[in-house]
């Protein structure tokens, strides 16, 4: 299992509503971890969630640091108010191996940087600790007492993450492969290119 060594970040797709998780491979098991709530020095611990038998999955390597695991599950389709169809379905989930972020910057300095990133022809600010919603959404959120979206810098095993929080709950992790004062190389995206550069 040497090729599976390390900790792997689950890559979320737009249709995934579960919280972010990590996996590790140990003997014949896939160990699933959720994340500790943010602590004083950022994200520091994984909390064991469940085990899965490796033999009940199949997997392919997309590249040396990205794996796709296939699992069987059920798809439920509503036909009417009283009828539905259930079918066995194979689901695919990608995971990316995390590596320590290459940087000479302190966490404090990283949080002061402001970049712009682009994904799927959509530009978005890569800025920490500021509400990212547009002014109209922000106004509605304030009326509903909702915090809105913001990026929080967190760290696990030497890897920095830009964690997207929505109304105080961590929803997505964007890994930071490298960062300096000019740019940030980000990973953890569901489609090619699997990494982007924010400048």
Image: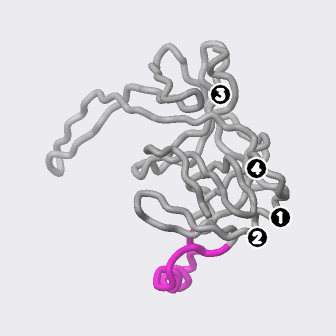
**Quarter of the image containing the C terminus?**
bottom right
Report crowding for label 1: few under 14, some 14 to 19, many 20 or more residues within 10 A (C-alpha).
Answer: few
Give residue 158's quadrant in the image: top right
Q: Nearer the viewer, residue 81 or 182?
A: 182
Q: Nearer the viewer, residue 17 or 177?
A: 177
Q: How far apart are marks 4 and 3 (CA)?
A: 17 Å
Residue 1: % across, % down: 64, 14
Which mark's residue is nearer the viewer, 4 or 3?
A: 4
Q: Is residue 92 in sight in this rendering?
A: yes
Q: Name the residue under label 4.
A: 155
26 horizontally vs 138: left or right: right
Q: Mark 3 points at which residue?
A: 24
Instruction: Tell me if residue 44 comes above or below residue 92 in the rendering.
Output: below
At a point 61% along the width and 30% down the height, the residue shown is: 50
Report crowding for label 2: few under 14, some 14 to 19, many 20 or more residues within 10 A (C-alpha).
Answer: few
* Earlier-in-chain disc, 2 versus 4: 2
* Earlier-in-chain disc, 3 versus 2: 3
Q: How far apart are marks 4 and 1 (CA)?
A: 12 Å
Q: Name the residue under label 1.
A: 108
Magenta part of the protein: which range? 130-149
Q: Mark 2 points at which residue?
A: 112
Is the C-beta separation of discs 4 and 3 under 8 Å? no
192 horizontally vs 30: left or right: left
Is the C-beta separation of discs 1 and 2 under 8 Å? yes
At a point 20% along the width and 46% down the height, the residue shown is: 78
């Amino acid at each position: 299992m040497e090729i599976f060594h390390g900790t792997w970040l689950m890559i979320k797709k737009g249709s995934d509503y579960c919280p972010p998780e990590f996996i590790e491979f140990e003997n014949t098991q896939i160990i699933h971890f959720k994340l500790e709530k943010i602590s004083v020095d950022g994200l520091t611990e994984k909390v064991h969630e469940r085990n899965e038998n490796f033999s009940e999955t199949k997997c392919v390597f997309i590249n040396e640091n990205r794996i796709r695991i296939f699992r069987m599950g059920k798809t439920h389709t509503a036909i009417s108010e009283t009828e539905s169809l259930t079918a066995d379905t194979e689901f695919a989930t990608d995971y990316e191996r995390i590596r320590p972020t290459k940087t000479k910057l302190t966490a404090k300095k990283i949080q002061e940087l402001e970049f712009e990133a682009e994904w799927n022809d959509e530009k978005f600010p890569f800025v920490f600790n500021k509400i990212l919603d547009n002014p109209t959404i922000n106004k509605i959120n304030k009326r509903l007492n909702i915090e809105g979206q913001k990026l929080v810098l967190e760290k696990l095993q030497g890897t920095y993450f830009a964690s997207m929080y929505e109304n105080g709950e961590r929803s997505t992790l964007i890994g930071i492969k490298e960062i300096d004062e000019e740019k940030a190389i980000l990973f953890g995206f569901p489609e090619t290119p699997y990494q982007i550069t924010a400048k």
